[in-house]
Amino acid sequence: MKTLYEATTKADGGRSGHITSEDGPLDHNLSVPKSMGGEGGNGTNPEQLFGAAYAACFGGALQSVAKNEGIEIDDDALSVTAIIGFCKDEDGFFLEATLDCYIPGVDLETGEDLVEKAHEACPFSKATRDNITVNLNLLLDE
């Protein structure tokens, strides 16, 4: 295995602390949502960060799969929305994810095929496979 890139990030103070990346662009305060017993606030939280990262990675996987399949898609109009649930059951806390994928200009069969293949290729999907529930949705033009 060849490592192409490594990202180094640091979190100080847990869920209500501060995060930074070693190279500077990531520099945010964290807040615990009121629904989780926190004070809310203007900071982000781990679920938002995970969702943003998963959505961006999955979008890249969709682009890659479409290119490999010879299917032209509008990269600027492509969007993936990640809804990340922080859940609790009798065994403790866990995450669940829903990915709403919008690939304009493709028919239902092509879109579903691209989403399934992207789910196989995406590094975040690989990392979460058999660990959390991931629901995949294809949003079509009306």
Image (tube, rainbow, N blue to C red):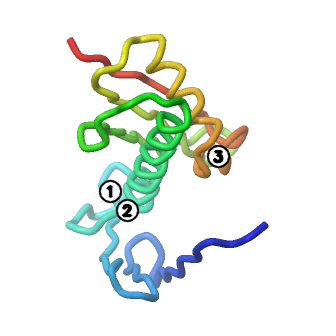
First in sequence: mark 3 or mark 2? Answer: 2
| Left/right of residue 100 with respect to residue 123 in the rendered view | left
Q: Which residue is mark 2?
A: 45
Which secondary structure lies at badge 1? loop
Along the viewing direction, whichever of 87 and 111 lies nearer the viewer: 111
Asked whether the residues under the numbered discs 3 and 1 touch, taking CB atoms below 8 Å apart as contact, a structural biologist would say: no
- Residue at 66% across, 39% down: 90
- Residue at 67% across, 46% down: 126
Vertical order, 34 against 64 (above or below): below
First in sequence: mark 3 or mark 1? Answer: 1
Mark 3 or 1, closer to the camera: 3
Q: Which residue is mark 1?
A: 33
The three-letter amino acid code for the residue at tag 3 is Thr
Along the viewing direction, whichever of 76 and 130 lies nearer the viewer: 76
The CA distance from mark 2 to mark 1 is: 8 Å
First in sequence: mark 2 or mark 1? Answer: 1
Q: Which residue is mark 3?
A: 128
Residue 60 position in % (x across, y down): 45, 48
Quarter location, residue 8: bottom right
Along the viewing direction, whichever of 32 and 56 lies nearer the viewer: 56
Which secondary structure lies at badge 2? loop
